[in-house]
Amino acid sequence: MFSPLVDVFGDQEVIRLFSEESLVAAWLEVERALAAAQAELDVIPAEAAREIAAAAQPEHVDLDALRERTLVVGYPILPLLEQIAKRSPAAGRHLHLGATTQDIMDTGLALVGDRALQHVETVVRTLGDRLAALADEHRRTVMPGRTHAQPAVPISFGGKVAVWLSELAAHVERLRSARARLAVVQLFGAAGTGAALGPRSLEVRHGVARRLGLGAVDVPWHTARDGVAETGFALAAVAGLCGRLAREVVELSRPEIGELREEGGHQRGASSTMPQKANPIGSEAVIGMSILAAHHAGALLAALQGTHERSAGEWQVEWDAVPAVFAAAAGSVAGAARVVQGLRVFPERMRANLDLDGGTIMAEAAMMEVGAVLGRAEAHAAVYEAAAFARSEGISLADALQKTLAHDVLAALAPLEEVLAPDAYLGETDAIVSAACRSWSRVMPSPRAAGTARP
């Protein structure tokens, strides 16, 4: 099935990792690791492990036949084993000994999910590094802050970006935490007791984990799917951030606002009928994929309801939902990184927009200054009246204050041009940007500082 959004705009490496070929290869990798661990512990003959290693290879699998038999059996592992055993009866004698279908598929998921999360982190690093540079560059680029979609008080564009960056740093930690719980071997047999694996089942499980580079747990998770759901949430959460970032770009690139714009290029964002159009297509794709990620994460939460020792249907939800949430989330992160990389910022338009509506965006600053003379409540009423007067008369807030405030109050104030200067009313913005950049450096130190150690 072709997905016009994710397949075109998504992250191709994650799509490859969750392809049919990749998943089958992962299942076979688990079977080979199981045989090797069992041979090391004299559970099966060493020669059997060598036979299995030679036979259980992706190039020996007929995918069309595997799909056809899966439709009959309900699961792909038995048909996969049949193909391997048919090719090598000697391998078939000891292949899959003591394991159950879900052991192999869950461990394959752990293997592929671990690799995919490692890749997602590299894509997140690209986005975060670009956001950190953007925040630092524009820490003093003043623009309107908006609440309820209306002008509120001045902020800096760097301060806005710092909020995205700080959240992204928190999402890195969530992804790493989820990865630690997802990337673990499942090898407990039919009902989670490990009985068919024999007296050395624990040692076999830990041996498989060591060979695959995964963690080992000593309690089965056949129906305890919290690690899978947590991963889906962490991915959907970072995709949600990217969707919010993209929505801001869409909003602020509207011509009547004009503070940002996506990168240009011949026919980029063009319309088939309106020649003037330059739609924010990169941001639109990010928004779409972030919504899909949230949708599929919800399916994983529903799949937590599996009962008894093996579920009947809930587990199958993961077969589609896990690849889908990975692909949509990774695509939204990669797309957001591309948007940020090519983002055009217009400081002059940002500053000009501060003067819209008579510069009443500085009303809070005026209230705080007047409040030092009259008290907060009376100052609020006085500046409210001045702002309303400015709108009704089409004059600036400064002129309205001059006309509405008592002379003794005006005389007690600092010069109005200082009180109403947006640059002077940014509060802790500079420190906020620095704190966000530090939080990013903490979770994502430069490669030189971090070395090559795996997180």
Image (cartoon, grey):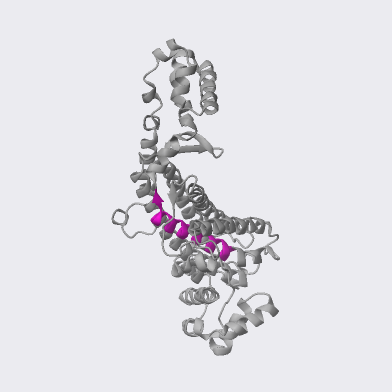
Residue 360 in the image: above or below residue 163: above
Magenta stretch in the rendered image: 322-345
How far across and down, in percent of the image, does residue 423 sit? 37, 32
The one nearer the camera, 283 or 354, is: 354
**Camera sees residue 427:** no
The one nearer the camera, 199 or 135, is: 135
Most distant residue in the top direction: 408
> How many discs mark residues in the rendered view?
0
How far across and down, in percent of the image, does residue 97 sit? 58, 77
Q: Is residue 69 left or right of residue 53?
A: right
In which quadrant is the N terminus drawn?
A: bottom right
**Camera sees residue 386:** yes
Question: Magenta includes 223?
Answer: no
Q: Which image quadrant is residue 426 in?
A: top left
User: What residue is at 55 percent from the left and 40 percent from the top?
Assistant: 149
Q: Is residue 57 left or right of residue 129?
A: right
In which quadrant is the C terminus drawn?
A: bottom left
User: What residue is at 59 percent from the left and 66 percent from the top?
Assistant: 188
What is the magenta segment's predominant secondary structure?
A: helix
User: What residue is at 62 percent from the left and 81 percent from the top?
Assistant: 79
Most distant residue in the front direction: 393
Question: Magenta includes 342?
Answer: yes
User: What residue is at 54 percent from the left and 37 percent from the top?
Assistant: 150
How far across and down, in percent of the image, does residue 424 sit? 37, 29
Q: Is residue 42 left or right of residue 414?
A: right
How far across and down, in percent of the image, does residue 183 sit? 50, 62
Q: Which image quadrant is residue 201 in?
A: bottom right
Residue 439 in the image: above or below residue 57: above
